[in-house]
Amino acid sequence: MKIDIVSVFPEYFDVMKLSLLGKAQAKGLLEVSAHNLRDWTHDVHHSVDDTPVGGGAGMVMKPEVWSECLDQLLGLDTSAGADEPSISQGPIVIFPNPSAPLFTQADASELSGAQQLIFGCGRYEGYDARIPDYYRAQGVDVREYSIGDYVLNGGEVAVAVMLEAITRLLPGFMGNPESIVEESYTGSEPLLEYRQYTRPTSWRGLDVPAILTSGDHGKVDRFRRDEALERTSQLRPDLVERLDCSQLDKHDRAK
Ligand code: SAM
C-alpha cells in the first residue's frame, strides 16, 4: 500500500518509522511519504491560507495550493488542452474533518484494501470546502472523516489515528494475524471485546475469573461471549441496537 500524507507539519509523521508501522515499511508492505504542502506554493511567504470569505475569525486553507499538490499526487494531467483533468480508478483521498461522519472500524477495514491513500491534513479553520467537491466531480474517491466529537488543532493526529487503524489490518502487518480477528468493533458483530488478563492469576488480592483457568474451552468461549455482550450493552448500547438478532444464539438472547 502506498500512503501519501500532505501537511504543513510533515515532521509529525517521523514517528511512522517506529514500532509495527516502521517494521511494515521495512518489510515493503507499505510505503509512507509525508509531503510539505508549502512545497506547492509560489509566493515568498509560502502561504497556504487566506481569510474566510464572508468574514469571521481565523484562516482557511487555499484551494489553489491544495489542487496543485493533489493534481501531482493523483497524477492528473492539467496541462494545456486538458481543461478538466479526469481519473477513473486511482488513489483514495482522505481529509480529516471534525464535521464529517465518524471514522469506524468498518471504514478502516474497507480502506485497508486500497492500493494508495492520500491524506490531506487541515489546519486553521479548515480547508476550502470546494476542494473535496472539485475532486469528487473529477471522479476521485474523496472521503472526509471525523475521528471523534471534539476539535483538534490540525488533521495530523487524526491521520495518524486512521493510519494505525487501517494499516494494522494489512495482511502480514501483525506478527500473529489471529490478534486482529477477535477485537472490539470487528467482524459481523461489532461488540466490545471481553476483558483480558495475563499471569499471575492472583495479583494484589485480585484473581482472574476462575473459569479462564479451567481449561474448558467451551466454557471459556461462553464466558467471554457473555462478557462481551454485557460490556457492550452497558457501555455502548448504540452498538447493541445495531446487532443482527438472527446471529444471536439462545444464550445470547437470555442476556
Ligand atoms: N473550523 C473547524 C470546525 O469547527 O469544524 C475546525 C477546524 S480544526 C481547528 C483544523 C483541522 O483539524 C480540520 O480541518 C481537520 O483537518 C482537523 N481536525 C480537527 N478535529 C478533528 C476531528 N475531530 N476529526 C478529524 N479531523 C479533525
Image (tube, rainbow, N blue to C red):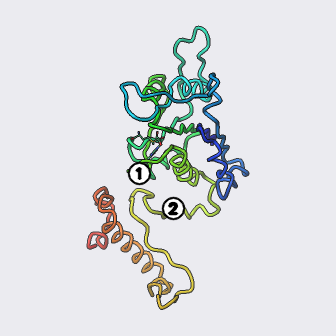
Q: Residue furthest right?
A: 26
Q: Quick check: 190 above or below 31? A: below
Residue beneath the point at 72% across and 51% down: 27
Tag in front: 1 or 2 = 1
Q: From mark 1 to mark 2, how far is it between C-alphas?
A: 24 Å
Residue 207 percent location from the top left of the image: 47, 88
Determine the residue positioned at 36% across, 70% down: 231
The quarter of the image holding the N terminus is: top right
Residue kind at label 1, given as amino acid type? Gly
Indicate the secondary structure of the residue bearing disc 2: loop
Q: Decide if ligand 1 comes within 8 Å of the CB at mark 1.
A: yes
What kind of element bears circle 1?
loop
* Residue under pointer 2: 181
Q: Position of residue 48 (x, y in %)?
A: 55, 29
Q: Is residue 188 above or below residue 96?
A: below
* Circle nearer the N terminus (1, 2): 1
* Snapshot quadrant of residue 254: bottom left
Left/right placement of residue 14 relative to residue 52 reads right
In the picture of the structure, the residue carrying the numbered disc 1 is 148
Q: Residue at x 51, y 89 (%)?
A: 204
Image quadrant where one finds the C terminus: bottom left
Q: Nearer the viewer, residue 113 or 64?
A: 64
Q: Position of residue 155 (x, y in %)?
A: 51, 43
Outermost residue toward the bottom in this view = 205
Q: Residue at x 50, y 27 (%)?
A: 62
